[in-house]
Amino acid sequence: MRTLVAHAAALLLLFPALLAALDPKGVRTFTLANGMKVIVEEDHDIPNVAMYLFYQVGSRNERPGITGISHFFEHMMFNGAKKYGPKQFDVEMEKAGGSNNAYTARDVTVYTDWFPRTALRLMFDMEADRIQYLSFDPKIIESERGVVASERLTRTDNNNFGLIYEQLNAAAYTAHPYGWPVVGWPSDIQAWSMEDLKAHFKMGYAPNNCLMVVVGDVSFDEVQKLAKEFMEPIPRQQPPPAVRTVEPPQLGERRVSVVKRSELPYQLVSWHVPKASHADIPALQVLSAVLSEGRSSRLYSRMVDREQLALSASAEVEQQLDPGQFLAYVRPRAGVDTAKTEKVLFEEIERVRTAEIRADELRKAKNQLLTQFYRQMKTISGRANQLGTAEIFLGSYEQMYGTPSRFEAVTAADVLRVAKQYLGPNQRTVATLIPEAAK
């Protein structure tokens, strides 16, 4: 405990200095004539660059019949265009000393490039090539369709967490597109037509639907010059239609169960919470940290440590463009009845709904959240991701710089209020994976 107090005191002294080091004046932006916005932060500490491209298209922008199509393009974008053929994006990048990755989510599809500054022109050339001239070779499409179907089989159908999470969302959302999986339903994966693919790509991968973030050993002027040369000639398109569906209020507990071969059960519980830009999100993040960050957190200390009911117990807040979820995860130990772990979980949720958290818990939760934030800010990759995420989900990259003050402003009364407001029994959806042998 003395060590914990000492660490907390050190952090309290350090955070103001870190906050002062966050300088929004070091970030500059411009918007091309075709609508693409570019955020640039110069950092010359190392001769490397992080380039993130946020396309504002994800499973949220799909419809029944084409679910999973946004994720499909995460694969297709590495399969050749006009100047750089199939797999050449990776080959050329590795030859230049760089690496890349990508991910698809409900709200965005993001491409992440890390490379030496000497490859900056090459990266603009390759990114522009695949945005404007992506190949729609039927053979490659069918090959990647099989890859995506296999990925779904591995990560969802044959994965306990993936399967129960998919069923939880399908029950929690009755109207909003967050109810279907990012990877897509199996029948839709097999049914996308060439017309579906071309229309979705034209809509989602238009320059006016893309945010580029460049952080590292660059100058603002050279990034602007390269963007005008390579990106500005790409024509703008009609943006994705607005998502108008609003999930109606949940008026009672919902339950779903999955019975399959498994050694251990799995439990997920969700509650509806506001979108990422809502003022209550920081208090909900503090609440999730109180419940599950570290060995002394409420769920871990009781369920995993003291009573040894579970192998793990945690909570998190999903931050989405539209209202998301507060999630609790429990993996019961072998031989422990899921009714027991569920009862204890709900007891802990009710505790935070009926009494304020202690001052030391509040301080610890803030320290943990601030530590996570500053760790991300230490790297050019972390800052590129944070700047783009803030621009899209919070309305402006400048909101990133207010993250520490928003955490610090949260009070114990705020945590109690959001717990009462959002984590009620009539607002929850409970999903349980039941091992087939336990039937």
Image (spheres, rainbow, N blue to C red):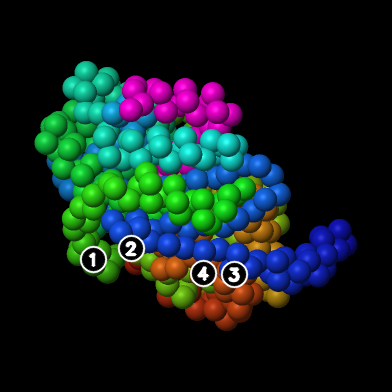
Instruction: Indicate which disc, 1 or 2, sits on the residue closer to the N terminus.
Output: 1
Instruction: Name the disc covering residue 398, or none.
Output: 4
State the separation of the CA atoms marked 4 and 1. Answer: 28 Å
Q: Which residue position holds label 3?
A: 25
State the separation of the CA atoms marked 1 and 2. Answer: 8 Å
**382 sits to left or right of 150:** right
State the separation of the CA atoms marked 2 and 4. Answer: 20 Å
**How dense is the environment of label 2, judged by Cα within 10 Å: few (below 14), some, or many (20 and up)?**
many
Tally the marks. Answer: 4
Say which of marks 3 and 1 sits in front: 3
Instruction: State yes or no: discs 4 and 1 in contact (Cβ < 8 Å).
Output: no
If the image is split into quadrants, where does the N terminus sit? Answer: bottom right
Q: Mark 2 is on which residue type?
A: Asp
Q: Residue at x 83, y 65 (%)?
A: 10
Instruction: Indicate which disc, 4 or 1, sits on the residue closer to the N terminus.
Output: 1
Instruction: Indicate which disc, 2 or 4, sits on the residue closer to the N terminus.
Output: 2
Q: Is residue 416 visible?
A: yes
Q: Is residue 205 magenta?
A: no
**Residue 15: % across, % down:** 73, 68
**How dense is the environment of label 1, judged by Cα within 10 Å: few (below 14), some, or many (20 and up)?**
few
Instruction: Indicate which disc, 2 or 3, sits on the residue closer to the N terminus.
Output: 3
Instruction: State yes or no: discs 1 and 2 in contact (Cβ < 8 Å).
Output: yes
**6 sits to left or right of 384:** right
Say which of marks 2 and 3 sits in front: 3
Depth check: 367 or 373 in front? 373
Q: Which residues are magenta?
A: 83-112
Q: Mark 4 is on which residue type?
A: Glu
If the image is split into quadrants, where does the C terminus sit? Answer: top left
Instruction: State yes or no: discs 3 and 1 in contact (Cβ < 8 Å).
Output: no
State the separation of the CA atoms marked 4 and 3. Answer: 10 Å
Element carrying mark 1:
loop
Instruction: Name the disc covering residue 322, or none.
Output: 2
